[in-house]
Image (cartoon, rainbow, N blue to C red):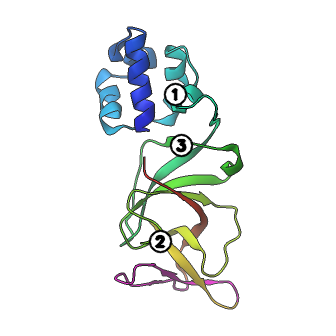
Amino acid sequence: MKKVINKIEYLLNEQNKTKKQLADYLEIKPQRLSNWFSRKSIPSEYLIDIAKFLNTTVENLYSEDEKIPLTHYLPIIGKASCGVPINYHFEDVEMYPVPEMLYREGRYIVVAEGDSMLPKIKDGDLVLCDKDAYVDNGNIVHYTLNGESGIKKIVMDENNKPIMLVPLNDKYPPIPVKEGDNLIYARCLKVFSDL
């Protein structure tokens, strides 16, 4: 998203438009827009209107190289703990451009936080997840267990029932999955470097 913010600032300057004019066009307070710029995070639902204001396309806001059009976007739904699971709440959803071959309905991205999945997943990495992909014993998953989100390797019994969530870094203990626990998971397919 940092590159998108930089592109928006460049286009504002190039077209002699101000952030206040952009805020007025979006019908939001200038302070809210300033917060987005300082956090390097713009809610995805505003990108189409921002592109219209700047006489461009959303694709152009994301693209650095016109030869590689990144016309598909997956939502970054928030952070996932790679350590002690933490319950996260998010107001804004960012979008991340991906090549067509990685785009599918049911896929999303989470931002890894912590070091329990080292060396495979580092703090700040973007992890592509697929809620519809088949999950087998030993796959790495993004999970929500009783309301807490994280990334771990899943261990299943002989009936393909999850019994444990295991970190790759042995300084962290495994998390048992007990009868009656509310566990939802999606397979982690790819790791990107952080934004």
Q: Image quadrant of residue 26?
A: top left
Look at the picture and state if 5 lies above or below 184. Answer: above
Magenta part mainly helix, strand or loop? loop
Q: CA distance from mark 2 to mark 1?
A: 38 Å
Q: CA distance from mark 1 to mark 3?
A: 11 Å
Q: Is residue 162 left or right of residue 167?
A: right
| Mark 1 touches mark 3? (CB < 8 Å) | no
Looking at the rendered structure, the secondary structure element under dot 3 is strand
Q: Position of residue 56 (x, y in %)?
A: 56, 18
Mark found first going from the N terminus, 2 or 3: 3
- From which residue to which does the magenta span run? 159-179
Q: Amino acid at mark 2?
A: Asn
Q: Position of residue 119 (x, y in %)?
A: 43, 72
Looking at the rendered structure, the secondary structure element under dot 2 is loop
Q: Amino acid at mark 1?
A: Leu
Q: Which mark is residue 96?
A: 3
Q: Position of residue 89 (x, y in %)?
A: 40, 53
- Taking the spot 56% from the left edge, 69% from the top edge, the residue there is 141
Foreground pick, 63 / 154: 63
Q: Image quadrant of residue 148?
A: bottom left
Q: Which residue is mark 2?
A: 146
Residue 91 visible? The answer is yes
Residue 147 visible? The answer is no
Mark found first going from the N terminus, 1 or 3: 1
Foreground pick, 32 / 142: 142
Q: Position of residue 104 (x, y in %)?
A: 70, 50
Q: Is residue 182 left or right of residue 125?
A: right
Is 150 contained in the magenta span? no
| Front tag of 2 and 3 | 3
Q: Residues within 10 Å of mark 1 (few under 14, many from 20)?
A: many
Look at the picture and state if 19 lies above or below 62. Answer: above
Q: Which mark is residue 188?
A: none
